Image (spheres, rainbow, N blue to C red):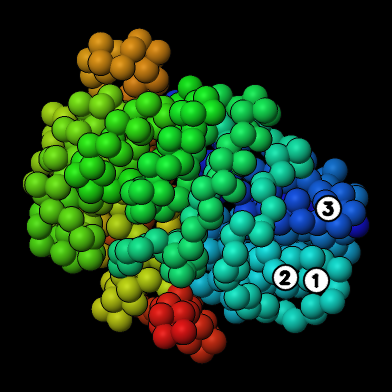
Amino acid sequence: MHIVFITPASTLRRFPVYRLGSRFYGHPNAITGPLILGGILKKAGHTVEVYEELNGKLPLKKCLKKADVFSIYTMTSTAPRAYELAEIIHANSDAKVILGGIHASALPDEAAQHADHVIVGEGESAILDVVEGRITDKIIRTAPPTDLDALPLPDYSILKTPCDCANIMTTRGCTYRCTFCTTSRMFAPYRQRSVDSVINEIRSYKKMGFRYMNFEDDNFTADKERAKEICRRMIEENLIFKETFFFGRTDIADDEELMTLLKKAHLNRVLIGIESLNEKALEEIHKGQHRDDIVRAAKACRKHKLRLFDLIFLGLEAATREDIRKAVRFAKDLDAYQLQPAILTPYPGTPVYQQFDAENRMIVPDWEQYDMMNVTFRPANLSPWELQEEFYHAVTHFYTFRSAIRIGKIFGWGYAIRRLGLAFFSKAGAFGARFAAEHAKGTFYYKLKHGVYEEEQAKGRPVLYQLSENDQENNFLTWEKERLIS
């Protein structure tokens, strides 16, 4: 059979200009799930293609002519596009549609309205049987694989859209349970691959000629001794890339040996969630860190020349406008390489979702806006549009043309050019959103600024949130309790 995997992108992210802007933020890459699942099917004798809509155009007409099965990955912000593609496929072919991923796993009944099958959870144990017809259930719930070493490596030969950065997951899950996080819930419990398995995968990417690599673990340094061993092996075997990105926490600063090894192994880009400088706000999301930890981590990254990505959250209950702006100034003062302001988003299946839903504070009935760049709820301390404005204030005040000079002096002039690009696209994006908010009736920004969403929500609860009993009872929170008990 011919199987096509699609990772869809929202309307905005399919625009060529947006794709160009994203090149300044990072290098084109592909999520590993479809590449692993596709590899399983390819090994079984099927023909497989994988497309990332963020990185290239999907040749849907061509695919419709030859595909027997489409497997579409869903995140909350891409769910409308996934459903749109599913309806197009059903209307124009006899191909089956499988939906999976985080959003479909959180709301399988919703996803099942558009699919022949919905895979809830990690799909390695089920994908072949679903495709070949041995499993015929509408909704298939899978158990998380316990031996990650037994899983195949991602197969980049089946990827048909641009990619110059390899992604690798050395673990699944996270040892923390931040109240806003979906991935730590979908991939619970926390599991590790062996160091030998990880190094084998890294070797393969060097042979393929990749110059860039991302460790996609929720927290690569959760087990510091294991992270050190991976770094040592990379150094010993010269498995060094031009840039290697990883997610970490502030506690990396407490281990000087780890910081030294990260530098030598060229793990030179790290995203650390600062979230807020407000202590009450940090306690609110169960982050498990404090302001002093953030300061210490930033200094350690600067000392070891790790380029720091600061992630700050906008919209936390205890945080004020001044707290947000302090965090932006803090990131600038620390010479953070990049800033990722993220608007608190109530994703289905998280405690934040449950809280805001119970308090009737969710106002936007369009999943596409749930991308951490748009306000979708009624904040505690600001109006929805005021919080949206703080997002644009953060990016335009951090990414300035003047700051590119300083970044160039610290990290090199190639990075100064990247900062100039980010400054241009940040200002252009903010201008476009503000213009739409004033003049483009019917757009998300106009409705948010003029209170249309709040008026509509006051008249009656949006249909989007009238979830089925199954979706209410079988979301991430239920799974989490079951897995913790087991």
Q: Which mark is residue 43?
A: 3
Callout 2 touching callout 3 (CB < 8 Å): no
Q: Amino acid at mark 2?
A: Ala
157 horizontally vs 213: left or right: right
* Residue 206, position as x, y percentages in the image: 62, 28
Q: Amino acid at mark 1?
A: Asp
Residue furthest front in the image: 236
Q: Is residue 42 above or below residue 299?
A: below
103 horizontally vs 268: left or right: right
Q: What is the C-alpha distance between the residues marked 2 and 3?
A: 15 Å
Q: Residue at x 19, y 44 (%)?
A: 254
Q: Which mark is residue 129?
A: 1
184 or 383, nearer to the observer: 184
Rendering quarter of residue 402: top left
Choose mark 1 or mark 3, whichever is in front: 3
Q: What is the C-alpha distance between the residues marked 1 and 3?
A: 14 Å
Q: Secondary structure at mark 3?
A: helix
134 or 443, nearer to the observer: 134
208 or 131, nearer to the observer: 208
Q: Secondary structure at mark 2?
A: loop
How packed mark 2 is, by other alpha carbons closer than 10 Å (few <14, some 14-19, many 20 or more), is: some
Q: Is residue 347 above or below residue 31?
A: below
369 horizontally vs 331: left or right: right
Q: Amino acid at mark 3?
A: Lys
* Residue 240, position as x, y percentages in the image: 50, 26
Q: Secondary structure at mark 1?
A: helix
